[in-house]
Image (cartoon, rainbow, N blue to C red):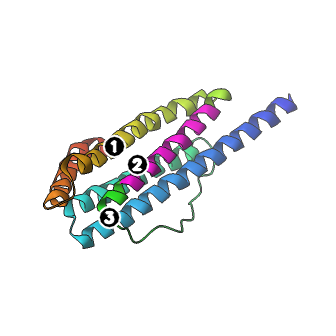
Amino acid sequence: MNEFITKNRSLLLETEELLNKQIKLEAVSSAIYLSMASWCEIKGYQNSSNFLYAHSEEEKMHMMKLFRYVNEAGGHALQPEISGVPLKFTSLRKIFEQILEHEIEVTKSIHTLVDHCFSNKDFTTFNFLQWYVTEQREEETLARRILELFDIIGEEGLGLWTIDQEIGKLGAGNASSATAV
């Protein structure tokens, strides 16, 4: 019986460690989007700035949801240390290219965590993480849609202004889903 308890405790600690890594990734996401929002604001991309400020808050909410889950499950959620957040960006398009790359990284991390839980028959955590699986699909789709705007509209003349306006519309359309927990 001791072997079973030891193995089970080891799996719980491994899951807790993976969840804390995801907490850090969500916190980093929030910090990156906050930095991007500030850059957009000083460059005059007000709608993109508002979109990214809201997105930063949404990522913080994702982190807090994980944080509470770990603690409620008897683990210890850890406040992550964050450093190396970029402060300057070269263009509005580059920001959204970085967002798509980052969201793909977050999706891979969620999938690793889900696979771990499924493989170890931690169906409670597996079920909890399904919300994140769906959320990541939405995040990637939104980032791809924004990048399509650059290709469809173009960046010349009023292009960037128009893209910023369209991002504002996309952000307004996602405001209700951002608050749904």
Give the SS element for disc 3: loop
Residue placed at 44% from the left, 47% from the top? 103
Dominant secondary structure, magenta: helix
From the viewer's side, name the closer residue of 122 and 172: 172
Residue at which label 1 appears: 144
Compared with residue 144, is residue 133 higher up or lower down, i.e. above or below?
above
Tag 2 and tag 1, C-beta contact below 8 Å: yes
Give the SS element for disc 1: helix
Specify the amino acid type for callout 3: Ser
Dot 2 crowding, Cα within 10 Å, few <14, some 14–19, many 20+ = many
Was residue 115 drawn as part of the magenta stretch in this picture? yes
Which segment is the magenta one? Answer: 97-116
Give the SS element for disc 2: helix
Q: For the image shown, how many numbered marks are present on the structure? A: 3
Specify the amino acid type for callout 2: Leu
Going from the N terminus, do you reach mark 1 or mark 3 first? 3
Counting from the top left corner in percent of width and height, residue 23 is at 53, 51
Counting from the top left corner in percent of width and height, residue 153 is at 18, 49
Q: Quadrant of the C terminus?
A: top left
Camera sees residue 179: no
Camera sees residue 87: yes
Residue at which label 3 appears: 91
Work out how far the residue at label 3 is from the one at label 2, CA to CA, in angstroms. Answer: 15 Å
Q: Residue furthest right?
A: 2
Specify the amino acid type for callout 1: Arg
Residue at which label 2 appears: 100
Going from the N terminus, do you reach mark 2 or mark 1 first? 2
**What label sits on residue 68 in the rendered view?**
none
Residue placed at 41% from the left, 71% from the top? 87
Going from the N terminus, do you reach mark 3 or mark 2 first? 3
Residue placed at 46% from the left, 51% from the top? 102
